[in-house]
Amino acid sequence: MNDFPQALTIAGSDSGGGAGMQADIKTMQERHVFATNVVVAITAQNTLGVQDSFPLPLELITKQFESLAADFHIKACKTGMLADAAHVAAVAENLRRFDFGPLTLDPVMIAKGGAALLTEDAITTLRNELLPLATVLTPNLPEAEVLIGQSVKTPAEFKLAAQILQKMGAQNIIIKGGHQTAEQQANDYILYADGSDEWLSTPRIETVRTHGTGDTISACITAELAKGTPLKQAIRISKAYIQAAIANPIAVGHGHGPTNHWAYREVEHD
Ligand SMILES: Nc1ncnc2c1ncn2[C@@H]1O[C@H](COP(=O)(O)OP(=O)(O)OP(=O)(O)O)[C@@H](O)[C@H]1O
Ligand SMILES: Cc1ncc(COP(=O)(O)O)c(N)n1
């Protein structure tokens, strides 16, 4: 028997525990999915910022993939912080070698505190090698703008950005509206592979505790896909999951605190 839902996060480690692969693993655990991981980089980080980071040797990235492929039945995977062009290329190569199910690609570029988590020269590699492998692509607004080279502010620009990203090769696109701070609602736009689309909007919560929101929603989608939840349902559950995690904060750290990964199971929802 080796059929318990298993998922994989390929990401950077956040010593502060609120973002990166720690957020991913906590979220997958909450969704009753066994989480495995490929550590791409280690950051020295807390809720005040990123103090240092170190990408692991490329051979060790490939060996982690090989170890997982030799033993686990991974049904869905996601990427987070990938550090630089060589690491993006190594991850893409290993994802072509092994079938770890649908890929949710969170194109992490800059941490909330402003630290670069991906070098600028890696963006072309990410666009050319990783983006076409994505079942779900989850850029925030600045990431969507960098990927398409155009402004993304209005609802029409959200839709256009998603169409352009779909033409670049990603199947389903979620443009996350967390950075639209002037809005009353947190508006995410989703363009599905079949051409249908929808807006998922929730009341915006005034808080500084939003460290790791993008990691968390993409990890929840990945966990649901590993269990076989249909994509539209997986995305709706994940939007409700991140809303509960932001709306029920825990007092940790002195800066951009983490979200509450266990809140969803303690609040009422559909
Ligand atoms: N203040 C908020 N209130 C409600 N929802 C929010 C808030 N901030 C972000 N969200 C939601 O959280 C999810 C992640 O969006 P966001 O744009 O913050 O991603 P991100 O910038 O990639 O996150 P991070 O870089 O912190 O991991 C989206 O569903 C977004 O709508
Ligand atoms: C290792 C790692 N991965 C991802 C993020 C993004 O999260 P945020 O934008 O909330 O800082 C991060 N800070 N650290």
Image (cartoon, helix red, strand yellow):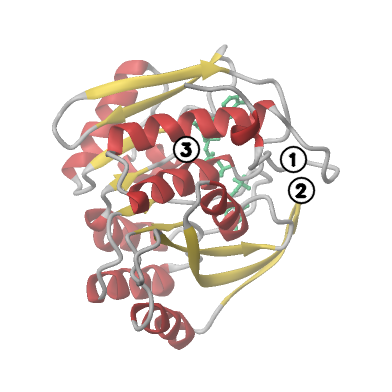
Label 1 residue near ligand 2, CB within 8 Å = yes
| Residue ranking furthest to the front | 1
Pointer 2: what residue?
Answer: 47
Give the quarter of the figure containing the N terminus.
bottom left
Q: Is residue 45 left or right of residue 115?
A: right
User: Mark 3 belongs to which amino acid?
Assistant: Pro
Name the residue at 32% across, 63% down.
125
Would the CB of label 3 be found within 8 Å of ligand 1?
yes
Q: At which x and y percent is residue 37? A: 50, 68
Residue where numbered disc 1 is placed: 256
Query: Measured along the vertical axis of the image, is residue 232 above or below residue 169?
Result: above
**Relative image position of residue 129 (x, y in whole percent):** 26, 63
User: For the residue marked with disc 2, what is the amino acid?
Assistant: Thr
Using the rendered view, name the quadrant where residue 69 is placed: bottom left
Is residue 145 shown left or right of residue 46?
A: left
Check residue 142 in the rendering and tell me which mark sits there, or answer none: 3
